[in-house]
């Protein structure tokens, strides 16, 4: 089995490619911020669950054994009241790009890409250590 055949590395590689493609779209949005009738584009959110659905894995669940323990379940995902902001504005020229929003997306995308590359590098170091090679 090659290194890239491992599910975690394949998923991280796909995630980094997604970030690269998103960075290109965000750069186009910024470049066309003053182009009349231009509407910004973005990629659909990357989902590891969709990528990993083809691989078998054991299911792990949590159970509160004491009434004072925190309950961790997927049904409480909205406990913080998270919702999408309706921050879409159109300029008089018909342009739908907000530079502030785009720069926030660029920064977030860059930080997520760096996190994925760090996980990738650390995973390779762990494998080298496990194989008895110097990291």
Image: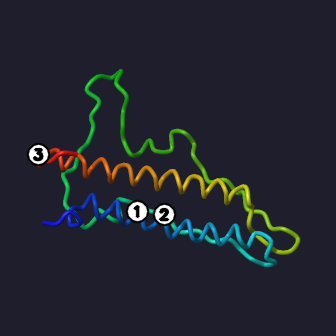
Q: Quadrant of residue 91?
A: bottom right
- Quarter of the image holding residue 62? top left
Q: Residue furthest front?
A: 134
Q: Position of residue 111 (x, y in %)?
A: 51, 50
87 left or right of 26? right
Residue drawn at the location 60% of the way across and 58% of the way down: 106
Locate residue 39, reporting x and y percent.
Answer: 71, 74
**Label 1 crowd bin: few (<14), some (14–19), many (20+), radius 10 Å:** many
Residue closest to the eye, 18 or 49: 18
| Callout 3 crowding tier (Cα within 10 Å): few <14, some 14–19, many ≥20 | few
* Spatial CA span between label 2 and label 1: 6 Å
In the displayed structure image, the side of residue 39 where residue 69 appears, left or right: left
Label 2–label 1 contact, CB within 8 A: yes
Describe the element under mark 1 as helix, strand or loop.
helix
Q: Earlier in the sequence, mark 3 or mark 1?
A: 1
Q: Compute the Cα span from label 3 to label 1.
A: 29 Å
| CA distance separating discs 3 and 2 | 33 Å
The quadrant of the image that shows the C terminus is: top left
Q: Which mark is residue 19?
A: 2
The quarter in which the N terminus is drawn is bottom left
Q: Nearer the viewer, mark 3 or mark 2?
A: 3
Q: Nearer the viewer, residue 39 or 134?
A: 134
Q: Residue at x 32, y 62 (%)?
A: 11
Q: Which residue is mark 3?
A: 132
22 over 134 or under it: above or below: below
Question: What residue sits 62% from the left and 66% below the top?
Answer: 26
Residue 111 lies, with reference to residue 5, above or below; the image says: above
**SS at badge 3:** loop
Decide which of 115, 37 is in the foreground and name it: 115
**Residue 121 relative to residue 15: left or right:** left
């Amino acid at each position: 089995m090659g290194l890239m055949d491992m599910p975690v590395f394949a998923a991280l590689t796909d995630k980094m490619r997604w970030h690269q493609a998103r960075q290109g779209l965000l750069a186009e949005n910024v470049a066309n911020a003053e182009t009349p009738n231009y509407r910004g584009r973005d990629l659909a959110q990357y989902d590891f669950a969709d990528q990993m659905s083809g691989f078998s894995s054991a299911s792990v669940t949590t159970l509160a054994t004491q009434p004072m323990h925190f309950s961790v379940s997927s049904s409480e995902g909205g406990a913080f009241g998270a919702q999408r902001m309706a921050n879409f504005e159109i300029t008089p020229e018909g342009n739908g790009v907000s530079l502030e929003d785009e720069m926030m997306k660029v920064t977030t995308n860059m930080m997520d890409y760096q996190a994925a590359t760090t996980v990738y590098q650390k995973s390779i170091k762990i494998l080298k250590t496990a194989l008895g090679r110097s990291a």
